[in-house]
């Protein structure tokens, strides 16, 4: 079994993991590889692509609008888009407000501008909205969704539900009721008295006005939140958890796998990215280090026609450097050999440089797709993968 | 990025200088306590050594503190209904969670409970929301108790002698891009100043330029004195370092180009040792200590 087989009939693939582990690159690589090795029409929806990634895809930049990657010539098709929180919110309001005047009043409300521009929960919610919108277009066989770092991944999974709970809450009804029936009655409530003293009456009435404006869209919010939830638990949706072999990202990934399983969401696999080559943790390297350390360098210096002290400085650096990497590789090997995961794992090696073109993305994507899944890493699998 | 390790190392380095330090984690899942032998952090600061204490932020407890100090409402047992109402307000009113967090930290600074408060902040995307909370509240709330209080918070946050943001990054593409974006947002949306950029996991050049021809010569000739394959692994490791270094130099150059000249950039070496958390923190503390 490999990731390619696991996602053969999938419609949504969500990549998640800590920051700085190559998640966005992996998502793009999967998009390139799948669209060039199958008939599938793929969309990669990314959060914050690096300039280099846009360059590698032959694009001037990646924006909120869906853009085709022309360099991908088939047999499939690749589109990419970036999630721009503010622009997505604005377009959501335009689409779903009952009339243009309400839309304008919402867009110019200071609370709205603060919510959408600054606060991260709005980001999580809009990511789900956007996903839903793109699924509705029915133009793609697979959508690869790159997510924000997983510290808020739970928020992101919960966002639709929280939004629905929020809009259907009695408290909100109760808070907005006076605006519909006059302010009388509200002032008498103890909750209002406390919040009034802390926040001031003006602020409360601003909140109220905002939510009264939004009320016209409540039903839609709740309905879509339910549908997004249905989308996430659908068997054609699944997650690829990504980490490097560092303690913190590993910890994060394990936590995430656990949470996804608790929610009965499907985890396709766990990708261990940027694994150091097995040769760095091999006994022969340690042996070579020892040999060079003890070697008499006089003849070598004569051979190379360089001063002995200079040669000795160079070999000392070589030894120190090799020992340092060997320590890291040994630590990785120890970590990887103790991983016992309930989900299939796949490891891909560390690359020398950064991927800067379509071929590089394609190669990485193919590797991720075709590397056989394992449930634990013995030394054999590891050396194969590295 | 190693943000948490750097925060811990910074706190330790300051404590080593004899300052009383509070190290606060914003994220309740932070593992910052592990480096100091604490498996669980609480809102109430725990002392880990003579002058270093650790706590984790919890907005509900901060609210309780707030109500006790400012409204003279002792909330001892019946936090339930308040917490519920609070959750509601926090969801509805942007910035409430953030202002409570920032407020609690600023309060500790104002009261001089500690010489230094080191905050292990949330990930890049979130920090501006916290630091901009007083302005956001000012823009939204025109009267009320909170409004009066944002002024002294802003005073503390805007004073570079009292508040500074240390941005931790690595010499890689996205971290550098994010660092420059963060600095721009800090500048545009808050009054808080950046204190330094720590570039973590920096590799040094394998050899000085003068020795490079020797390295190349050794690599090309592979003298008979060594068994055939024994040097291969060493050169493989050397190639790895130099490849990473080439990429790192490029990104470091971009970083420096994007930074104000007076903002200090601290290179923190890649820690290779498979050491445990506390010794890594000590090592970071030592190397940062030299830079402070």
Image (cartoon, coloured by chain):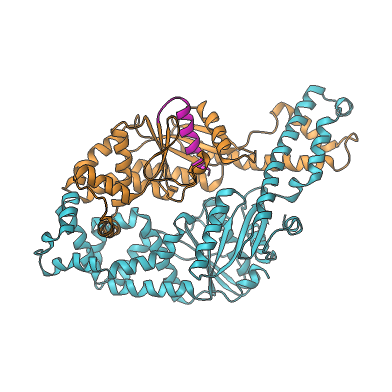
Q: Nearer the viewer, residue A142 or B43?
A: B43
Left or right: residue A329 compared with residue A126: right
Q: Residue at x 8, y 64 (%)?
A: A184
**Taking B157 as reference, is A125 above or below it?**
below
- B172 up-or-down from B194: above or below: below
User: Residue B209 at what x, y percent from top left?
Assistant: 69, 29
Residue A26 can be seen, yes or no: yes
| Left or right of residue A43, residue A34 in this image | right
Q: Quick check: A358 above or below A9?
A: above
Q: Looking at the rendering, which quadrant does residue A295 occupy?
A: top right
Q: Residue at 87% of width from left, 29% of height from top? A: A300
Q: Position of residue A371 (x, y in %)?
A: 69, 64
The colour chain B appears in is orange
Provide the residue span drawn in magenta: B1-20
Q: Main secondary structure of the magenta part?
A: helix
A64 sits left or right of A78 in the view: left
> Residue B109, how many percent across, how many down?
32, 34
Task: Point out residue A232 in the picture as x, y percentages from the top left corner.
Answer: 47, 71
Which quarter of the picture shows residue A314? top right
Q: Which chain is cyan?
A: A
Q: Is residue A88 positioned above or below B217 on the image?
A: below
Of residue A202 and residue B178, the one placed in the foreground of this image is A202
Quick check: is B31 in the magenta stretch?
no
């Amino acid at each position: 079994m490999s990731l390619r087989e696991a996602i053969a009939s999938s419609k949504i693939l969500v990549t998640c993991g800590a920051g700085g582990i190559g998640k966005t690159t992996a998502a793009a690589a999967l998009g390139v590889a799948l669209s060039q090795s199958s008939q599938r029409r793929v969309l990669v929806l990314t959060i914050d692509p690096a300039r280099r990634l846009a360059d590698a895809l032959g694009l001037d930049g990646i924006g909120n609008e869906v853009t085709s990657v022309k360099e991908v010539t088939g047999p499939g098709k690749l589109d990419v888009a970036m999630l721009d929180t503010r622009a997505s919110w604005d377009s959501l309001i335009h689409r779903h407000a009952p009339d243009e005047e309400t839309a304008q009043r919402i867009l110019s409300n200071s609370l709205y501008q603060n919510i959408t521009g600054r606060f991260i929960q709005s980001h999580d919610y809009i990511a789900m909205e956007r996903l839903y919108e793109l699924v509705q277009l029915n133009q793609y066989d697979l959508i690869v969704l790159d997510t924000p770092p997983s510290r808020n991944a739970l928020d992101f999974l919960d966002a639709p539900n929280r939004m629905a709970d929020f809009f259907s809450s009695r408290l909100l009804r109760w808070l907005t009721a006076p605006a519909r029936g006059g302010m009388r009655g509200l002032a008498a409530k103890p909750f209002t008295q406390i919040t009034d003293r802390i926040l001031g009456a003006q602020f409360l009435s601003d909140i109220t006005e905002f939510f009264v404006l939004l009320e016209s869209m409540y039903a839609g919010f709740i309905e879509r939140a339910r549908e997004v939830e249905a989308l996430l638990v659908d068997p054609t949706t699944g997650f690829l958890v990504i980490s490097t072999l560092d303690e913190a990202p590993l910890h994060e990934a394990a936590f995430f796998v656990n949470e996804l399983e608790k929610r009965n969401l499907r985890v396709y696999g766990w990708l261990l990215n940027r694994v150091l080559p097995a040769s760095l943790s091999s006994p022969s390297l340690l042996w070579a280090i020892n040999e060079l350390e003890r070697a008499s360098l006089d003849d070598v210096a004569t051979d190379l026609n360089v001063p002995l002290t200079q040669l000795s400085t160079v070999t000392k650096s070589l030894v120190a450097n090799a020992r340092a990497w060997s320590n890291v590789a040994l630590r990785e090997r120890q970590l990887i050999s103790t991983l016992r995961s309930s989900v299939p794992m796949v490891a891909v090696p560390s690359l020398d440089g950064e991927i800067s073109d379509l071929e590089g993305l394609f190669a990485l994507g193919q590797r991720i797709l075709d590397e056989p899944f394992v449930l634990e890493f013995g030394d054999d699998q590891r050396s194969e993968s590295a | 990025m190693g943000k948490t390790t750097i925060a811990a190392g910074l706190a330790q380095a300051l404590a080593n200088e004899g300052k009383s330090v509070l190290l606060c984690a914003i994220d309740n899942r932070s593992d910052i306590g592990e480096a100091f032998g604490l498996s669980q952090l609480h809102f109430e600061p725990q002392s880990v050594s003579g002058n270093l204490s650790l706590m984790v932020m919890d907005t509900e407890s901060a609210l309780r503190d707030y109500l006790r100090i400012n409204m003279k409402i002792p909330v001892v047992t019946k936090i339930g209904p308040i917490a519920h109402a609070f959750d509601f307000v926090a969801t509805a009113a942007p910035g409430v969670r953030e202002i409570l967090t920032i407020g609690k930290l600023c309060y500790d600074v104002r009261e001089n409970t500690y010489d230094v408060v080191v905050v292990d902040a949330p990930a890049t995307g979130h920090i501006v929301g916290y630091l901009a909370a007083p302005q956001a509240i000012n823009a939204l709330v025109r009267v009320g108790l909170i409004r009066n209080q944002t002024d002294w918070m802003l005073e503390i946050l805007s004073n570079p002698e009292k508040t500074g943001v240390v941005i931790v990054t690595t010499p890689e593409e996205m971290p550098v891009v994010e660092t420059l974006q963060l600095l721009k947002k800090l500048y545009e949306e808050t009054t808080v100043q950046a204190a330094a950029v720590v570039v973590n996991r920096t590799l040094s050049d394998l050899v000085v330029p003068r020795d490079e021809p020797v390295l190349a010569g050794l690599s090309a000739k592979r003298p008979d004195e060594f068994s055939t394959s024994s040097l291969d692994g060493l050169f493989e490791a050397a190639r790895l370092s130099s490849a990473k270094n080439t990429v790192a130099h490029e990104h470091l150059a971009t970083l420096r180009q994007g930074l104000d000249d007076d903002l200090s950039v601290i290179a923190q070496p890649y820690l290779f040792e498979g050491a445990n958390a506390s010794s890594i923190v000590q090592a970071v503390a030592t190397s940062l200590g030299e830079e402070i």
